[in-house]
Image (spheres, grey):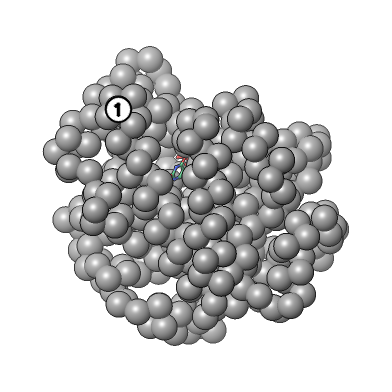
Amino acid sequence: MISIADNRGVELVLSQDVGVARSAGTPIVALESTIVAHGLPWPDNLDIAKELEGAVRDAGAVPATIAIVEGRPRIGLDAATLELLAQDGAKLSKAGAIDIAVHVARKTSAATTVSATSVLASKVGIRTFATGGIGGVHRGDSGDVSHDLVALARTPIAVVSAGAKSILDLPRTVEMLETLGVLVLGFNTNEFPAFYTRTSGIQLDHRADTVADLAAIIRTHWALGGGGVLVANPIPEDAELDGDMITANIESAIAEANARDVYGKRLTPFLLARLAEVTGGASIRANRALAVGNAALAGQLAAQLGNAPP
Ligand code: PSU
Ligand code: MN
């Protein structure tokens, strides 16, 4: 492990692989740990975490799964730490960008969401990040809007995502991305993908059909001082779920969350677990396929964007 301090003195720990890649200029792709700890059940979560890292490697980039371990932000995890995170996931805290300081100061551990992962990745010069689906505006009028959106707006990183989880209010999520100034690029699609399905009926302003076109736009966006970019990559066709089936199950899962008064950080993991149960694991298979697709695309994109200079 290689320990570095950022310019304000917060210690960040790079895995050997990531440290070498950073010095050599090999492209690095960040991966989040909340999807492993809280988004998917053991032991599938460990298999999927490894598969995501493999998909990044196959594309010629180096994966950096990010988490906070005993107060130290870790950029790239060794096999034993990844396994622990997957196995003890349910007991672990879920940290958004807002929560990082609490864990660092108190030397506690947490899985990192899209917001926390983006912020930490960006601190070490990583420009590309693959996830399943970002957080967004929750349905109903609870006022629950994931910090992922605000953090993305502020952080110059390209996040490859299968749209946003369809448990959310997708039209409001897309509007909020625009309000905050997050550039959304559909990859081979005109529509914002709905995680388990390729389409949502929501038209996007911009579409790119090649990785080179994506990279050219993203580089220009950053040259103009822009922040986060969301690359919306639909689930592969052969893994897509039936829209009516998943919509009905999502609605019943949300009704159950409301009846049991589940809200805040616990809401997303609760809904994902409920969906896995009622679909007999189909939602997990879909989640896996889309996340692996995103990791592969992020690997190719990182090869063109490179890392920020160390
Ligand atoms: N994508 C998935 N599964 C997940 C998540 C994303 O396929 O579990 C996680 C991400 O870490 C995302 C978080 O940042 O859910 C959003 O949580 P919240 O809605 O509480 O902000
Ligand atoms: Mn929330």
Q: In which quarter of the image is residue 270?
A: top left
Q: Where residue 76 sits: x, y (%)?
A: 69, 54
Asked if one can make out residue 8 in the rendered structure from this viewpoint, the answer is: no
Q: Where residue 220 sits: x, y (%)?
A: 48, 84
Q: Where residue 297 sits: x, y (%)?
A: 43, 67
Residue nearest the observer in this picture, 14 or 50: 50
Helix, strand or loop at disc 1? loop
Q: Where residue 273 sits: x, y (%)?
A: 40, 28
Q: Residue at x 22, y 44 (%)?
A: 241
Vertical side of 239 occupied by 40: above or below: above
Residue nearest the observer in this picture, 67 or 82: 82
Q: Which residue is drawn at 40% across and 18% down?
A: 261
Q: In which quarter of the image is residue 296?
A: bottom left
Asked if one can make out residue 169 in the rendered structure from this viewpoint, the answer is: yes
Residue furthest to the left in view is: 244
Residue nearest the observer in this picture, 151 or 199: 199
Quadrant (top left/top right/bottom left/bottom right) for the C terminus? bottom right
Quadrant (top left/top right/bottom left/bottom right) for the N terminus? bottom right
Q: Which residue is drawn at 62% across and 52% down?
A: 65
Dot 1 corresponds to which residue? 280
Vertical side of 39 occupied by 149: above or below: below
In the figure, is residue 306 to the left or right of 106? left
